[in-house]
Image (cartoon, helix red, strand yellow):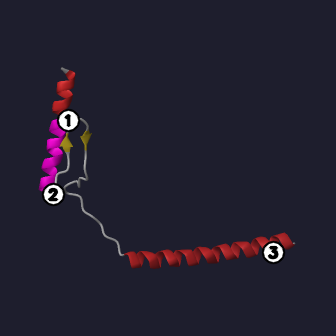
Amino acid sequence: MEVVKARQKMENILNIVNQNAIQTKIEPKVRLNERASTGYQELPGLRHETKDVLKQLQNNIALLEDLGGRLGFVMSEVRSVIRR
């Protein structure tokens, strides 16, 4: 009896996933066979953020230059302390 209930619950979940896929215009890829398999599913209502990769690269390069300068300063201070 529990196996039947578990199978019905799984079928209900898969039906919900397929309905959501149809609503988000994604091909439903969830099927129930001997083993349940799930496909890619976007969640409805979530916004996708896009990032400007060139701006992000520029920011990363600036950060690396800053950190490199700081490291150079620390290394020169350490050298001067060692020489004393």
Q: Residue at x 81, y 71 (%)?
A: 81
Q: Residue at x 55, y 75 (%)?
A: 64
| Among numbered discs 3 and 2, the one appearing first in the sequence | 2
| Among numbered discs 3 and 1, the one appearing first in the sequence | 1
| Mark 2, other Cα within 10 Å: few <14 / some 14–19 / many ≥20 | some
* Label placed on residue 80: 3
In this rendering, is residue 61 above or below 2? Answer: below
| Among numbered discs 2 and 1, the one appearing first in the sequence | 1
Foreground disc of the pair 2, 1: 1
> From the image, which quarter does the C terminus lie in?
bottom right
Q: Write down the residue under mark 1.
A: 10
**Residue farthest to the front?**
34
The disc labelled 1 sits on which kind of residue? Met
Foreground disc of the pair 3, 2: 2
Disc 2 and disc 1: Cα gap in Å? 21 Å
Q: Residue at x 23, y 55 (%)?
A: 42
The disc labelled 3 sits on which kind of residue? Ser
Q: Residue at x 81, y 74 (%)?
A: 80
Looking at the picture, how far across and down is residue 36, in whole percent?
24, 39
What SS does tag 3 mark? helix
Disc 3 and disc 1: Cα gap in Å? 69 Å
Q: Write down the residue under mark 2.
A: 24
Q: Quadrant of residue 67?
A: bottom right
The disc labelled 2 sits on which kind of residue? Thr
The residues colored magenta run 11-25
Disc 3 and disc 2: Cα gap in Å? 64 Å
64 horizontally vs 58: left or right: right
